[in-house]
Amino acid sequence: MNTMEFDFGMVGLGVMGRNLLLNIADHGFSVVGLDLDPQKAAALEAEADKGKAVKGTTSIQEFVSSLQKPRALMLLVPAGKAVDAAIASLVPHLEPGDIIIDGGNSYFPDTNRRIVELEAKNLHFFGMGISGGEKGARFGPSMMPGGNRQAYERLRPVFEAVAAKVDGEPCVAYLGNGSAGNYVKMVHNGIEYGIMQLIAETYDLLKRGLGRSDEEIQRIFEEWNGSEVHSFLVEITAQILKKTDELTGQKLVNLISDWAKQKGTGKWTSQNAMDLQVPLPTVDIAVTMRDMSAYKEERVLAAQSLAIPSNPTESSENWYVLEEQLRNAFYFAMLTTYAQGLVQLRVASATYDYELDLQEVAKIWRGGCIIRAACLEDIRQAFATNPALPNLLLDPTIGQELLKRQEDMRTVVKLAIDRGIPVPALMTSLAYFDAYRSETLPTNLIQAQRDYFGAHTYERTDQPGIFHTQWD
Ligand code: 6PG
C-alpha cells in the first residue's frame, strides 16, 4: 500500500483523463489515476516522465485513501449514467469536505441534481467544462468550473497551473454557482457549432460560388488566419485542407462523408435558448444543418428534380465577389454568433443565479478552447468597459466592426442566393443584425392575428392597457 498523499486524483484514464493528469503532474503536483481497466492504469505510469509522482491504480480504496484531504478528484468519464455510476462508487469512501469535479460535457440540470445530492452528504461537486481536445488537456486547456466558491480555493492552484495562458493569465476562473461551469461550456459548444457552420458555408462559397481550386481555398484560409478572423477553427481548417489521402492521393476532405454527427451540446444550447426566450438563430441553424446533412438519399434525389434556373437571376456586379468580401462576411457573422451566445449567458446568469462575469468568460475563452479567436480580446474589452452591456452589437467598437462589413455581408448573401448555395448561417446572422437594429418589427401584425383568432389581446402604442377587438 502506497502511503504517499497525492495532491489530485483522476477517475477515468481515457485519453482526456490521462493527458490532463500528466499535464497536472508536469506542473509539480503529485497525481493518482483510477481506471478499472488495468491497461489504462499502467499506461498512465508508463507515459509519465521519470521522477514525477504519478500513480495508476484499479482499486477505488487505494485511490481514495492515497489522496490528500480534503480530497480533490476529477471524473473524466462519458456524460450521463457513467458519471452517476462513478459518483455512487466513490461516495462511500469519501469524507465531508471532499470535492468531486466532473470534467465532462454534462447536461447542466444533471449537475444541479448532483450538487444537491452530494451537498446532503457534505461533499462538494463541481461541474467543469474543459475545452481544447486531447492536445489541450495535455498542454493547456481552457477550463470552466462552477460550484462552491470556497471549495474552489482548494482547486485553484492546480487549475491555474495547468490551464492555457494568454498574456500570462490562465484560461480558467471560478465562474459561478451551481451548474455555471457546465452551462458556460454548453454555450461555448453552441458557438462552436455556429462558427464551424459559418466556415463550412464560406468554404462552399469559395468552392461552388467562386470556383476556387482546393489549393487556392487552402491558401485563402491560411492567409485569413493572419487577419482579424484569426482563430483556432480557421487555423485547423487550413490544415485540414492541406491533408492528402494516403490511399488515393486525393485531398482527404473531398473523400469524407458529408453527414455531420453531433453529441448533443449544440442542441442543448438551442433548446435552452428557446426556454429562456433568447434569440440564438446562428446556433439553431448550425444544429439544423447537421440534421439536414443526414438526409443524404433524399438530397441526392432532390438534386435531380429541384435544379435552380439555368439563367440565375443575378445582376452582373454580383458575379464578382472578392475573397476579402467573403472574409468580411464571415467575420461579421462570427461576431454576431459570439453576441448571441453571450446574451444567452447573461439571461441564464440572471435566471439561474449563476452570477457570471462575462468579461471573465471572454477572458478564459481567449486561449486553450475550440472557439479561441483574436476577437475575444475585443469582446473581453467590451464587457470590461460596460459589464452590463446587453448585447455586443451595442458596443461601439464591435458595432463599428459590423458596420464596416455589412455591405460585403449583403453582397455575399446575394451571391449565394443567386447561385442557390445554402448559406443559412450567414443569412441568419445578417437577419439577426437587421432584426436587432430594427426599431419596429412587423410583430404588431402577429399580435393582431393572435387577437383575431384567439382573443389573445394586445397592447397599444398610444395608450396603456390590454385590448381586445371584435375583428370581423
Ligand atoms: C471542446 C469540444 C469538445 C467536443 C465536442 C464535440 O470544447 O473541446 O467542444 O467538447 O469535441 O463536444 O461536439 P459534437 O460531437 O457535438 O460536434
Image (spheres, rainbow, N blue to C red):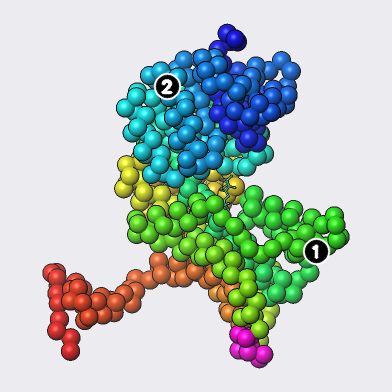
- Compared to residue 280, the image places residue 315 above or below, namely below
Q: Give how far across and how far down residue 254 sits, in percent.
A: 75, 64
In depth, the one of 88 and 146 nearer the eye is 88
Please tell me which of labels 1 and 2 falls first in the chain.
2
Question: Which amino acid type is marked by label 1?
Answer: Glu
Q: Residue furthest bottom?
A: 311
Q: Look at mark 1 in the image and give the residue it sits on.
A: 215
* Magenta segment boundaries in residue numbering: 305-315
- Determine the secondary structure under disc 1: helix
Mark 1 vs mark 2, foreground winner is 2
Q: Look at mark 2 in the image and give the residue it sits on.
A: 92
Residue 84 is left or right of residue 47, and the answer is left
Question: Which amino acid type is marked by label 2?
Answer: Pro
Residue at 73 percent of width and 24 percent of height: 46
Q: Is residue 32 visible?
A: yes
Inspect the magenta stretch and tell me whether residue 264 lies in it.
Answer: no
Q: Which secondary structure type mostly characterizes the magenta part of the structure?
A: loop
Q: Is residue 359 visible?
A: no
Ligand 1 neighbours mark 2 (CB distance < 8 Å): no
CA separation in Å, label 1 and label 2? 59 Å
Inspect the magenta stretch and tell me whether residue 314 lies in it.
Answer: yes
Residue 272 is left or right of residue 413, and the answer is left
The N terminus - image quarter: top right
- Determine the secondary structure under disc 2: helix
Residue 64 is left or right of residue 134, and the answer is left
Q: Give how far across and how far down residue 433 sits, in percent.
A: 45, 67
Residue at 56 percent of width and 27 percent of height: 10
